[in-house]
């Protein structure tokens, strides 16, 4: 096996094994593995990005429904626009396919007399799979949420002088 050469200043983009979980999610979960957190991980500003104008109407509704809640949890940042837009677009397309299935059913009779599954079934499955991956990454599934321990006092401001003087800052 040849050793890998890493040049000074070169960023290694690909790595083996399981994809690392973002530090923000690890912190919300209480760092269950008790491993050292990545202090060099980029920390973009926790602010929901603007909804892209090119999203479908239903995707925009999903964006508005989730973005502020995710921003409040510290999960959605300005640099997550493309990934979150992809989730919202997949949601809109999944919903369209499911509505078609509800209206027309899952199978049709072909002109030759055979029964065939409508394409919307596989389309819905494809977009549901994509949504699931994005939901896992953003902590939006019941399983990933159950591992998160939110700090209810995370947004409270504690004056440093009150700390030094022993004031009651938990009012």
Image (tube, grey):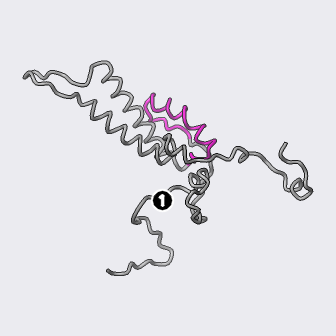
Name the spot of residue 149 as percent of width and height, x first: 62, 47
Secondary structure under the numbered disc 1 in the rendered image? loop
**The C terminus - image quarter:** top right
Q: Main secondary structure of the magenta part?
A: helix
Residue positioned 85% across, 56% down in the render: 160
Q: Is residue 22 left or right of residue 128?
A: right
Residue positioned 9% across, 21% down in the render: 113
Report which residue position mark 1 lands on: 20
User: Pointer 1: residues within 10 angstroms few (<14), some, or many (20+)?
Assistant: few
Q: Please determine whether, in this image, residue 75 is positioned above or below residue 66.
A: below
| Residue that extends furthest to the bottom in the rendered view of this protein | 2
Q: Is residue 19 left or right of residue 158?
A: left
Picture quadrant of residue 67: top right
Q: Is residue 92 left or right of residue 45?
A: left
Q: Nearer the viewer, residue 147 or 9?
A: 147
Picture quadrant of residue 48: top right
Q: Please determine whether, in this image, residue 161 is positioned above or below residue 104.
A: below
Name the spot of residue 76 as percent of width and height, x first: 56, 45
Quick check: is 108 in the magenta stretch? no
Q: Please determine whether, in this image, residue 89 is positioned above or below residue 41.
A: above
In the image, the segment drawn in magenta is 50-78
Count the labels in the image: 1
């Amino acid at each position: 096996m040849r050793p890998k050469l890493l040049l000074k200043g070169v960023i290694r983009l690909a790595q083996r094994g399981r994809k690392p979980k973002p530090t923000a999610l690890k912190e919300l979960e209480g760092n269950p593995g008790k491993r050292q957190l990545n202090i060099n991980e980029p920390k973009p500003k926790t602010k929901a990005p603007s909804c892209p104008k090119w999203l479908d109407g239903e995707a925009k509704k999903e964006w508005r429904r989730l973005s502020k809640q995710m921003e409040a949890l510290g999960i959605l940042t300005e640099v997550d626009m493309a990934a979150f837009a992809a989730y919202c677009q997949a949601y809109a397309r999944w919903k369209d396919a499911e509505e078609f299935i509800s209206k027309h059913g899952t199978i049709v009779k072909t002109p030759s007399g055979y029964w065939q599954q409508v394409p919307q079934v596989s389309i819905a499955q494809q977009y549901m799979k994509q949504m699931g991956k994005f939901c896992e990454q953003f902590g939006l599934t019941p399983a990933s949420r159950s591992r998160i321990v939110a700090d209810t006092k995370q947004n409270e401001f504690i004056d440093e002088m009150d700390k030094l003087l022993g004031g009651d800052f938990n009012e």
